[in-house]
């Protein structure tokens, strides 16, 4: 029996759907790992996290999966989050075939930082998303009216060129805001060059493959970042530099130096995070996440500060305070009802990577001052 015939029978009989549901069921094992929080909030958020990953996975592997007719979708956003998603970012993703050529056309907007990276791999396959090409605002040629064009191909092109390898399968766009309320995001679209074809109706084979890939994406992503969170537990309430090579292997921006860790606070405690100085850099921020490495709900809570929002200390450094209730400090970070979670600091394009200093104190002592 040929593969299309097998797929048609699997879809028609319901076998493909049952296999998809069985694969999703396995993902729930990551929420019940022995080291994960057992409180009701984290358990509820854990299972919601899986539904969010499923929404992303279906967009990625079914709705926007055709590299012949690519379009941009959001792989992380306000209600679907992966791996310490940056609250100051607008993410876009397009699916590619590295053996083809593509063009991105857009209008630059006014965002503080804009980068484009092509990648290969995926969390549903080998747990990696390795970069194959990169361009950002420092080298992007933009016309006076804000318009730009980028060619994506295996062979170098004049102007803005984004490198592809035969195994390249996606382009990731990061737009980073200093002040989301005032800055305009870039607008863009992507197209394959030289196709001359029209999209075909959905086939059983495409549906079956999309469901299989989406289910693998949910399980692979949940497993990867559960492993990361577990690795942070031994240095809870400190903020060491992450393994930068590992961050790059899973799709990190090469301009970013990452710090990841775990935090846990009693009701009467606060975590002071002190940046002794702010180096020359293109951007920095610090964010608070739940255990599943989802940024806490930044629509309704202050869980992140950057160089625009954070108030400087008298000596030029920055002190941030994570606490369950308002400690009366300008740089308060909210726990949003969580007793523990993860956190992330980014230096973007920094001349040096300043190590943050942390300490846990009683909230009642904060009135005496915030000097680290």
Image (cartoon, grey):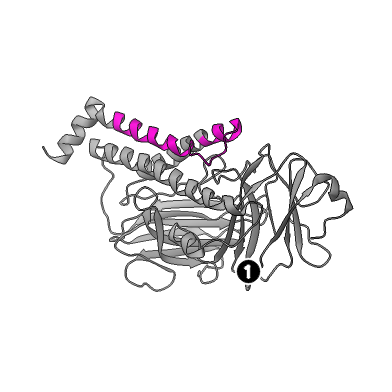
Q: Nearer the viewer, residue 50 or 183?
A: 50
Count of number-bearing discs: 1
Seen as rendered, the residue at the extreme left is 1
- Closer to the camera in the image, 364 or 98: 364
Left or right position of 23 against 45: left
Q: Is residue 28 magenta?
A: yes
State which region is magenta. Answer: 18-46
Q: Residue at x 88, y 49 (%)?
A: 367
- Residue farthest to the top, as pictured: 13
Residue at mark 1: 353
- Residue 256: image location, x then y, percent: 55, 64
Q: Viewed as shown, does residue 16 lie left or right of 74? A: left
Q: Quadrant of residue 60?
A: top left
**Residue 365 horizontal side relative to residue 231, left or right:** right
Q: Position of residue 58 (x, y in %)?
A: 39, 39
Answer whether residue 82 is magenta in the image: no
- Quarter of the image that includes the C terminus: bottom right
Residue 213 horizontal/vertical position (percent): 33, 43
Magenta portion: prevailing SS class? helix
**Location of residue 292 by image quarter:** top right
Dividing the image into 4 quarters, which one contains the N terminus? top left
Element assignment for label 1:
loop
Q: Nearer the viewer, residue 241 or 172?
A: 241
- Identify which residue is drawn at 85% across, 45% down: 364
Residue 75 seen anywhere in this rendered image of the structure:
no
Tell me if mark 1 has few (under 14), some (14-19) or many (20+) residues whose alpha carbon lies within 10 angstroms of its own.
Answer: many
Q: Position of residue 357 (x, y in %)?
A: 71, 61
Q: Say which quarter of the image contains residue 56.
A: top left
């Amino acid at each position: 029996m040929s593969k299309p015939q097998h797929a048609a029978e699997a879809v028609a009989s319901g076998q493909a759907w049952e296999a998809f549901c069985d694969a999703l069921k396995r993902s729930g094992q990551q929420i019940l790992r022995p080291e994960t929080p057992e409180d009701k909030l984290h358990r509820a958020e854990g299972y919601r996290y899986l539904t969010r990953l499923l929404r992303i996975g279906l967009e990625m592997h079914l709705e926007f999966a055709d590299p012949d007719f690519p379009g941009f979708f959001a792989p992380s956003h306000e209600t679907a989050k992966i791996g310490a998603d940056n609250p100051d970012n607008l993410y876009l993703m397009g699916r590619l075939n590295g053996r083809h050529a593509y063009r991105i056309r857009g209008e630059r907007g006014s965002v503080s930082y804009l980068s484009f990276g092509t990648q290969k791999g995926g969390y549903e396959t080998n747990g990696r998303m390795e970069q194959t090409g990169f361009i950002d605002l420092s080298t992007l040629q933009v016309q006076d009216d804000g318009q730009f064009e980028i060619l994506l191909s295996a062979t170098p092109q004049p102007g803005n060129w984004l490198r592809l390898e035969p195994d390249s399968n996606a382009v990731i766009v990061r737009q980073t805001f200093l002040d989301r309320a005032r800055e305009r995001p870039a607008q863009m679209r992507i197209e394959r060059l030289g196709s001359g074809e029209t999209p075909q109706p959905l086939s059983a084979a495409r549906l079956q493959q999309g469901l299989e890939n989406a289910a693998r994406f949910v399980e692979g992503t949940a497993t990867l970042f559960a492993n990361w969170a577990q690795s942070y537990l031994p240095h809870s309430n400190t903020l060491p530099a992450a393994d930068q090579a590992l961050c790059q292997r899973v799709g990190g921006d090469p301009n970013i130096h990452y710090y990841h860790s775990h935090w846990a606070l009693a009701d009467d405690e606060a975590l002071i995070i002190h940046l002794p100085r702010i180096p020359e850099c293109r951007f920095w921020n610090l964010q608070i996440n739940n255990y599943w490495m989802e940024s806490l709900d930044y629509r309704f809570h202050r869980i992140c500060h950057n160089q625009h929002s954070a108030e400087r200390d008298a000596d030029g450094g920055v002190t941030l305070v994570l606490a369950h209730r308002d400690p009366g400090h300008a740089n308060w970070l909210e726990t949003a009802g969580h007793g523990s979670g993860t956190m992330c600091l980014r230096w973007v394009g920094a001349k040096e990577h300043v190590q943050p200093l942390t300490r846990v104190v009683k909230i009642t002592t904060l009135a005496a001052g915030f000097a680290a």
